[in-house]
Structure formats: C-alpha cells, structure tokens
Image (cartoon, helix red, strand yellow):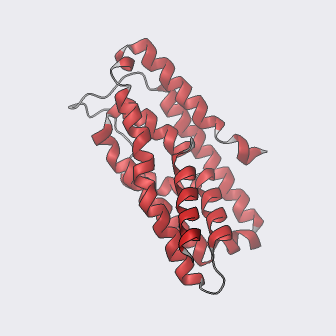
Amino acid sequence: MSFEAFLALLVYAFVTSVTPGPNNFMLLASGVNFGFVRTVPHMLGIGIGFLILLLAVGFGLGAVLTAFPMLHTGLKIVGGVYLLYLAWKIAMSRSMASKGEAQANPMRLIDAAAFQWVNPKAWVMAITAMAVYTNTDHPFLSVVLISMAFAIVNLPSVSVWAGFGTALRGFLSDPVRLKWFNIAMGVLLAATLWPMLR
C-alpha cells in the first residue's frame, strides 16, 4: 500500500469513526449519564471489538456472509433487535449516575466489544474498508494495515463523543432536560437502523 493510499485510508477510518452512528450516540449518552472516566471501558471495548471484526472480515468472514445470505440476514435481525433494546434502555434512563452510585452502570468493555458484531454501521465500515483498500498482491499485509489505520483513529474519534457528553452533564443536570436528552438519544440510536432496513 502506497503512502498516499494509507493516508486516504486514515481519512476514511477517521470520517467513518467520528460520524454519528450507534456507537457514538451511545457514547454521547454514556458521557452525559456516567461521565468520561466511567465511559472509558465502553470506548476501549468499541476499539477492541471493531479491530477483531475488521480482522475477521479481512481474513474471510465477509466471504462467508456473502456465500450464506441467511446467516447475514439473521445477524442483521439479531443486531437490530439488540440495538432497539439499547435504544429503549437509553430513552428510559431518567437520572445521572453520581460517583458513588452503583445501581446504574455504563456499558462494560466486553459488552461494547461484542456489540460491534451486531452493529450495522461497524459491518458496513469493515466490509467497505476491506473491499476498497485491500491489495490483492499483498492481502495479509493489507488487512493488517487497514486494521492498524482504524486502531490509530478509533479511540480519539469516539472520545470526542464521550467528551461532548461529559461537557453536557452540567446543562443536563436538570431532570427534565436529561429526560428529553435521553429520549432523543434513544430515538436517534433506533433511527440508525434505517439504512439497514431499506
């Protein structure tokens, strides 16, 4: 892969990682409801889970899903149902977690990593990156470089959303504002399913 192609890949990775989608809406809501530090495991889970998904797609899972469309459809259905469940939980959240509060918990690293496997945007990003940027003369190296590019930009990109949510905590400390913010985040998260359903 040429230097110019790698730079183009970094731009693609950054743009797709920083734009709105299920992960970023959940991080925004988590930043508001739990603060930045308690959202770090969620951010790390996204990066780790997406890296594993990228490697799997690059090393053949994408071909398996193309060969077995019913498996792909099943994955979309499971992912859609789980995404709606998460949207409902966010929309129904009514109070911010204080530092000592244990009843409400942000998404754990393992949950965020597993979510990448049912996240429609993550699949589109992974399959597109592998289709566009893989060099057939050096497939193994290409998959590794694509995965590295996403690993470089992912954490800074998703941190922006958690940071923005944390910055809104003061404004949203009013229970009415928080209620409507969480409802809006739940609706936006559910709306990310629209491209998958068309």
> Which residue is farthest right?
198
> Which residue is farthest front?
4
Q: Is residue 127 above or below residue 103?
A: below
Q: In x, y percent, where is residue 156?
A: 40, 50
> Which residue is farthest left?
100
x 33%, y 20%: residue: 170
Q: In x, y percent, where is residue 63?
A: 69, 74
- Front residue of this view, candidates 176 and 94: 176
Q: In x, y percent, where is residue 22?
A: 55, 43
Location of the C terminus by quadrant is: top right
Q: Is residue 47 above or below residue 85?
A: below
Q: Is residue 192 above or below residue 136?
A: above
Residue 117 visible in the displayed image:
no
Total residue callouts? 0
Residue 103 in which image quadrant: top left
Residue 181 visible in the displayed image:
yes
x 34%, y 38%: residue: 105
x 53%, y 30%: residue: 185
Q: Is residue 22 above or below residue 2?
A: above
x 63%, y 70%: residue: 133
- Front residue of this view, candidates 110 and 161: 161
Q: In x, y percent, where is residue 128?
A: 66, 63
Location of the N terminus by quadrant is: bottom right
